[in-house]
Image: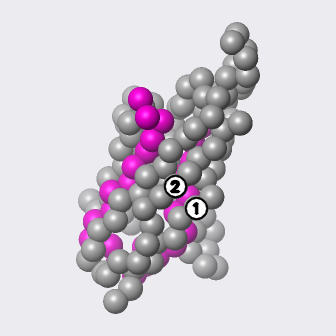
Amino acid sequence: QVQLVESGGGLVQPGGSLTLSCVASGSIFSIDDMGWYRQAPGNQRELVAIITSGGGTIYADSVKGRFTISRDNAKNTVYLQMNSLKPEDTAVYYCKADLWEKISRVVVSTKSTYWGQGTQVTVSS
């Protein structure tokens, strides 16, 4: 069974910084894209940033130049460094991973999408 667990959220003043982490654990064969999404009250979940297995990145226009996504493939971990935070960045941040699960010694699943439980980020003075 695969789990994604986020950490690093909290309360920060405008202009401040936070770093989110997400660790994928369980019977993992390989991980493809990993990413961060966020959902503010009353809004739909939206893309924040994606990083491919090769290190390519995509960012939402609203966070370009302020947020940086990175990953450590050896640790099955993705990070989101958030700088110059604004009140409009307040949301629950979710980690997502597209991965292949190891079913047995010789059997691998089809690629599936897994989500973390979310971590709250609040930007307020």
Residue 117 shows up from this direction = yes
66 or 60, which is in the foreground? 66
Residue at the image position 73 percent from the left and 17 percent from the top: 104
Name the amino acid type tagged 2: Glu
Residue 57, position as x, y percentages in the image: 38, 43
Residue at the image position 38 percent from the left and 85 percent from the top: 124
Residue 64 shows up from this direction = no
Residue 100, position as x, y percentages in the image: 64, 27
Label 1 sits on residue = 118
Residue at the image position 43 percent from the left and 72 percent from the top: 10
Residue 123, position as x, y percentages in the image: 39, 79
Question: Above or below — where is 23 with respect to 7?
Answer: above
Residue 77, position as x, y percentages in the image: 45, 41
2 and 1 marks in contact (CB < 8 Å): yes
Question: Above or below — where is 110 with respect to 6?
Answer: above
91 part of magenta stretch: yes
Residue at mark 2 to residue at mark 1: CA–CA distance: 6 Å
